[in-house]
Image (cartoon, rainbow, N blue to C red):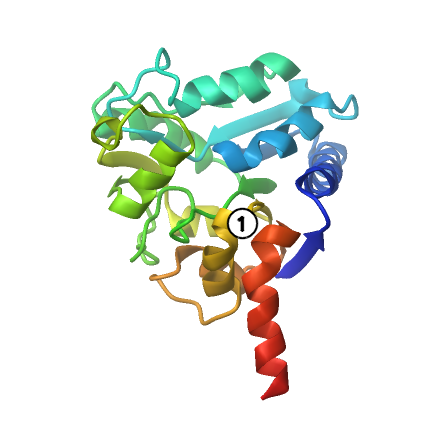
């Protein structure tokens, strides 16, 4: 795992987008297509803006998979991650081949089709973030590191639900769903390359716990330490506690 720190969120986003473009184009050059996983959430705004503004990707040759979605949330709702991806990635690029999770369906039904599709071939590059509680996708602590199922139904803990409220997706905590469909940890880790975009001071504690400590289900994103081709992109604010931890360890 490589950690890169940038002076600003904008510079972070531009660097991550450049690496994403290289990964996507490399897969297209090698096999004629690229399979990607797209993250959502407020932390991904600038990255997706930089990525979709580029004219260097032949999006007609890209197949996209969805990381997670709330149970019971339709695309008509502002909090829908399907809606997010349509507005911030699909509609902007003209992407034609994509697999979204329909939160209004019974979870088993919503999972069935996308699980079959993602299992057909390896993922070239996954875009992920880190939750304020250290979650990876919607795998809250303690995360299930063992299941081989591509997608699972998860219970959202209070810290995760408060983050969604704080980001402005819901009017009250009671409105935040208590369950979601999430790509599993092992499915994410099967990706050939993972680009983890984690800016903002509110992520600093989780970043330090996940990347400055041991790999543990209690810090779900810490599993990225075990991936052979992961880059973590931080800005000064999100890197602050990790840098303090590293400096302290070096003095001992």
Mark 1, residues whose alpha carbon is within 10 Å: few (<14), some, or many (≥20)? Answer: some
Image location of residue 27, percent across then percent down: 70, 37
Residue at 40% across, 56% down = 220
Instruction: Residue 92: name its quadrant.
Output: top right
Is 145 left or right of 85, judged from the image as shown? left
* Residue 39 in view here: no
Residue at 47% across, 33% down = 41
Q: Look at the image and tell me in which quarter the N terminus lies.
A: bottom right
Instruction: Residue 111: name its quadrant.
Output: top left
What number of labels is visible? Answer: 1
**Front residue (pair 72, 250):** 250
Is the residue 234 above or below the residue 28 in the image?
Answer: below
Q: Residue furthest bottom?
A: 252
**Front residue (pair 44, 64):** 44
Residue at 34% across, 33% down = 165
Is 91 left or right of 40, judged from the image as shown? right
Image location of residue 249, percent across then percent down: 57, 81
Image location of residue 100, percent across then percent down: 42, 23
Instruction: Residue 63: name its quadrant.
Output: top right
Dot 1 falls on a residue whose secondary structure is: helix
Which residue matches tag 1?
Answer: 201
Q: Look at the image and tell me in which quarter the C terminus lies.
A: bottom right
């Amino acid at each position: 795992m490589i950690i890169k720190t940038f002076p600003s969120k904008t510079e972070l986003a531009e660097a991550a987008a450049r690496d994403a473009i290289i990964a996507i184009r490399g897969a297209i050059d090698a096999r004629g297509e690229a399979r990607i996983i797209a993250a959502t959430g407020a932390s991904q705004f600038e990255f997706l803006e930089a990525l979709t503004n580029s004219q260097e990707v032949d999006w007609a040759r890209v197949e996209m998979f969805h990381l997670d979605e709330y149970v019971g949330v339709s695309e008509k709702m502002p909090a829908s991650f399907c809606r997010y991806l349509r507005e911030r990635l699909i509609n902007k690029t003209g992407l034609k081949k994509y697999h979204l999770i329909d939160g209004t369906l019974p979870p088993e039904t919503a999972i069935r089709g996308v699980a079959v599709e993602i299992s057909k071939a390896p993922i070239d590059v996954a875009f992920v973030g880190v939750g304020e509680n250290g979650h990876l996708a919607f795998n809250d602590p303690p995360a299930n590191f063992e299941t081989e199922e591509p997608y699972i139904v998860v219970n959202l803990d209070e810290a995760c639900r408060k983050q969604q409220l704080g980001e402005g997706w819901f009017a009250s905590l009671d409105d935040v769903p208590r369950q979601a469909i999430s790509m599993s940890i092992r499915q994410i880790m099967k990706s050939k390359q993972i680009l983890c975009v984690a800016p903002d001071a509110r992520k600093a504690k989780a970043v330090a716990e996940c990347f400055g400590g041991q790999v543990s289900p209690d810090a779900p994103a810490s599993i990225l330490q075990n991936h052979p081709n992961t880059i973590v992109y931080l800005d000064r604010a999100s890197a602050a506690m990790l840098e303090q931890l590293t400096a302290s360890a070096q003095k001992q």
